[in-house]
Structure formats: structure tokens, C-alpha cells
Amino acid sequence: MNKRIALFPGTFDPITIGHANIVERAMQLFDEIVIGIGINSSKSTLFDIEKREAWIKDMYKSNNKVRVVRYEGLTVECCQEVGANYILRGLRNMADFDYEKNIAQMNKLIYPNAETVFLMCDPAYTPISSSVVRDLIRNGGDASAYLPAEVQYKHG
Ligand code: ADP
């Protein structure tokens, strides 16, 4: 049987415990998870790509089922490059669903070899998003409860 390889694409600016929960649960379903950090030159981020990548690599350094790549361009092209036959996304609410539905259907049209799989967010993680975390950080709040221990933004 083909290896089940899932690409988990996102901006991860920064990665949160909500993302980590999706990865952890997806580990039961897939043989390999490739976390793909999408680089979108028209989208400015709070944390540079080096930091975002280093944090995620650090989190999964002793996990041989998870690896991290950066990619530019289409998510389905990244799927092709890494050999992913699944695209993994998390859903928190109806707004996520509306947004994700179109992307998943378009991805299927242009690249039928990859099936998008959605994991419903565990209830405790529903309010957690990278954008809320960034707002907290920008305004001097403490976001550490929502971040994996490896994400040490205060110390560079
Ligand atoms: P993007 O910019 O592509 O939306 P993100 O890094 O914000 O990238 O999110 C990547 C994926 O993680 C998306 O599928 C998003 O719905 C999911 N996600 C983000 N936060 C959570 C959370 N708290 N619980 C479950 N899934 C989440």
C-alpha cells in the first residue's frame, strides 16, 4: 500500500498549540506529516521564515514522522514535490469551513491526486489562532499559554 503522506500547509506565524493538536491527532492517521510553511511575498508576517521554521523543527526534532519544508507557489505543487497524497487542514468554525471549502475543491480540480482531509478542532483550541496570538504579542500581552514551549519569541 502507498505510504499515506499528508502535507499540512499554513503560514504558522507563529505555530500555536492549536496547530500542534492537529499534527498530534493526524499522526494516528498518516504515515508521514510534512508541515509546509507557505511563503507568500505579498503577505507580511510578524515572525520571519527562519524563526517560524526553526521553532517547528525544534518541536518535532525527535519525531521521525514529521518533517518541515518551506514552499512558494501552489500548495498542490508542494504536494507533488514531497509526494503528499493528502492535504491536512484544521477547522475551527463556519468561517474556516467557508474559506477552506473553495480551496479544497479548487485543489482537487487542479490536482486530483491529493485528497484534502479536515480535522475538527478539539473544543479547547477553538479560540486560538495565530492572528489572536500576534495581536497579544504586539500589545505586550502574554501569549505563552497558546504557544508550544519551543516558541520563544521574547528571546529572539
Ligand atoms: P493559513 O494562513 O493558511 O490559514 P495558518 O497557519 O493560519 O495558515 O493555519 C494553518 C491551518 O491550521 C489551517 O487549516 C487552520 O484552520 C488550522 N488551525 C489554525 N489554528 C487552529 C486551531 N486552533 N485549531 C485547529 N486548527 C487550527
Image (tube, rainbow, N blue to C red):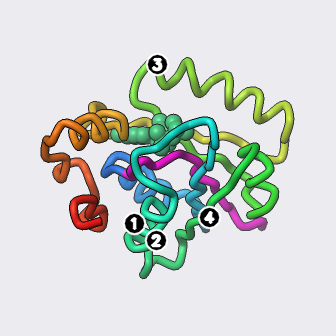
Q: Is mark 4 on a helix, strand or loop?
A: strand
Q: Cα distance, mark 1 to mark 3?
A: 28 Å
Specify whether residue 90 is in view. no
Secondary element at image label 3:
helix
Q: Looking at the image, is mark 1 or mark 3 earlier in the sequence?
A: 1
Which residue is at a point 17% across and 50% down the rendered structure image? 145
Q: How crowded is mark 3: few (under 14 residues within 10 Å), some or many (20 or more)?
A: few
Ligand 1 has an atom within 8 Å of the beta carbon of the residue at disc 4: no
Magenta segment includes 43: no
Is residue 5 inside the magenta stretch?
yes
> Taking 150 as reference, is 98 left or right?
right
**Image position of 59 with respect to 154: above or below:** below
Dot placed on the residue nearer the N-terminal end, 1 or 4: 1
Q: Name the residue under label 4.
A: 69
Up-down relation of residue 59 to residue 28 (above or below): below
Q: Residues within 10 Å of mark 4 (few under 14, many from 20)?
A: some
**Real-space CA distance between mark 2 and mark 3, rounded to the nearest whole angstrom:** 29 Å
Label 3: which residue? 95
> Do tag 2 and tag 1 residues touch (Cβ < 8 Å)?
yes
Does dot 2 land on a helix, a strand or a loop?
helix
Q: Decide which of tag 2 and tag 3 comes sooner along the chain.
A: 2
- Mark 2 and ligand 1: say if the CB distance to the nearest ligand atom is below 8 Å: no
Nearest the eye: 28 or 22:
22
Dot 1: what SS?
helix
For disc 1, the marked residue is: 55
